[in-house]
Amino acid sequence: MNTLPAADSAPRSLVRERIGPARPPIPLASLAERVRFASLVPFNFILKLACVRFETFLALFERLTPASIDWAGRWRARATFYRAARRVPAYRHFLRSSGYRGGSPPETDKENYIKRYRTERRCDGGRIPEHDVTIDESSGSTGTPYNWVRTGLERHQSHIFISYFARYCYGTGRYLTINAFSMGAWATGINMGVALARNGIVKCTGPDVEKILHTLRFFGPRYRYLIAGYPPFLKHLIDTGEAQGFPFGEYELRALVGGEGMAEGLRDYLLRRFRTVYSGFGATDLEIGIAGETPLAVAIRRLCRARPEVRCALFGSDSRLPMLFQYNPLMHHVEVNANRELLFTISRKSLLSPRVRYNVHDEGGVARFDELQRRLSACGVDITALGAREGTRQLRLPFFWVYGRRDYTVSVMGANIYPEDIEQCLYADAALAKITHSFCLALEESAGADVHPKLIFEVDLAPTAELVAAYRESMVKGLIALNADFRAAWHEYPEALAPVIELHPRGAGPFAADAGRIKQARLLKRAEGSAGP
């Protein structure tokens, strides 16, 4: 489980605020824990020096053993917990209200922590500084915007890691980056531009095909290009360019994608025009650049696609092929709970609004480098040889894998579509609500590797083309009104957001298992044939 180390069952020192003895005290580290934290001081000093330059950063993680990385990551996360309990009013109240008295801290998520406390109370010291703070925005499950505050130092550290990830995957030579992520209040677009500017030249176009093709034509094939954007958008870029007769073969293009899962079929499609395609992992709730697909991680995933027995040995019996990432556990501590959901603790002191054991409800798993190495070896695969074939220096960083949101939220072009959104759209249309029994969300990948949201409804009428059109019109209209991310992505590229509508009579198709129930329930299911995590 790679769990955060538990506190001693009877901490030696406890702090009580003047609120009466009946409330649980604020935990402080025991003497044994303080000794461990003291032993981290020289380690943290070396880490700080190593991260100043890309070459020393690589050298450090080439030499550290998986066990030492794991030990330091767990105790840095433990120190973060104590710091948050001491300095963050909301987290202190959260621990008390949950009755915490030692052991592994309770999980936090949007429902039990973010929605419960004001932004200021979730900040270090209970306030938002008046200088050097940036606010990012994301959309909640009902379209309510959520704001996330970050200090300049916190963003700077994240930019460094993204910069190093790009240099590791794409090489240290200079390239012209075209940043096609959505611009504005969203976390990814502007921050990706700033981070990648550390490596070379950047032009932020947003997801605008014509601007990108114009930029390529203007500067010509003498430059080496890195194009960053949502996976389906880069496919649209290729399709549009080919339709216009753009000479892709004359250009050296690489792709950096993120914002949603990517099927290997789509990677294959992109590799027709891009020399390499790697994805990053992040969440606005947490931060961007938490992890990345390394050449080794991609090689392992593609091996698992070709050999189901390897997939089963690495990830278990689940038939889905998860996305696989490597991450720096000295910045992000990752655990897995009993529901196979990933928990994240960002263990840097620079965080204005700390997140401790935060659950974004992504389903997946985690493994140390040497653990995954042993599992591959049992299948006759040498991880060292596999990495050597990819031509990059092997970093013994841990892995985590992601199937997708446990609540089956789907994401297209960076826009999350939630079951609550669909339910609200249905209730807004009385005629459709009356005939709809339940629904499913999924992603559909066509033979041409196009990805669209797929909405499947169980209805009380015979499905007709007119009824399909009515559902499509109502869902699009409702999602544009409810969901800020969907609305922005729709205006930028409506073709990718156009939902595929599928109707089934009562008890048919994916709803067959529920044919005998009496009470209506708009249950969320994973539809057959959904693509990617």
Image: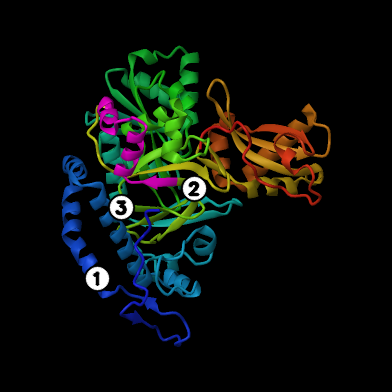
| Rendering coords of residue 122 (x, y %) | 43, 66
Residue matched to label 2: 362
Of residues 401 and 237, the one drawn nearer to the viewer in this rendering: 401
Three-letter code for the amino acid on which mark 1 is drawn: Arg
| Rendering coords of residue 269 (x, y %) | 46, 21
Q: Is residue 230 left or right of residue 457?
A: left
Residue matched to label 1: 34
| Rendering coords of residue 438 (x, y %) | 73, 44
3D distance between C-alphas at marks 2 and 3: 19 Å
Three-letter code for the amino acid on which mark 3 is drawn: Met
Question: What is the chief secondary structure element of the magenta stretch?
Answer: helix
Assess disc 1: are there few (<14), some (14-19) or many (≥20) residues with their C-alpha within 10 Å of its C-alpha: few
Query: Which comes before the other along the chain, label 2 or label 3?
Result: 3
Q: Give the magenta part as a residue range.
A: 365-390
Vertical side of 22 occupied by 280: above or below: above
Residue 406 seen in the figure: yes
Looking at the rendered structure, which numbered label has been put on residue 331?
3
Looking at the rendered structure, the secondary structure element under dot 3 is: loop
Three-letter code for the amino acid on which mark 2 is drawn: Asp
Magenta span contains residue 388: yes
Assess disc 2: are there few (<14), some (14-19) or many (≥20) residues with their C-alpha within 10 Å of its C-alpha: many
Q: Is residue 168 left or right of residue 130?
A: left
Residue positioned 26% across, 35% down in the render: 168
Of residues 407 and 269, the one drawn nearer to the viewer in this rendering: 407
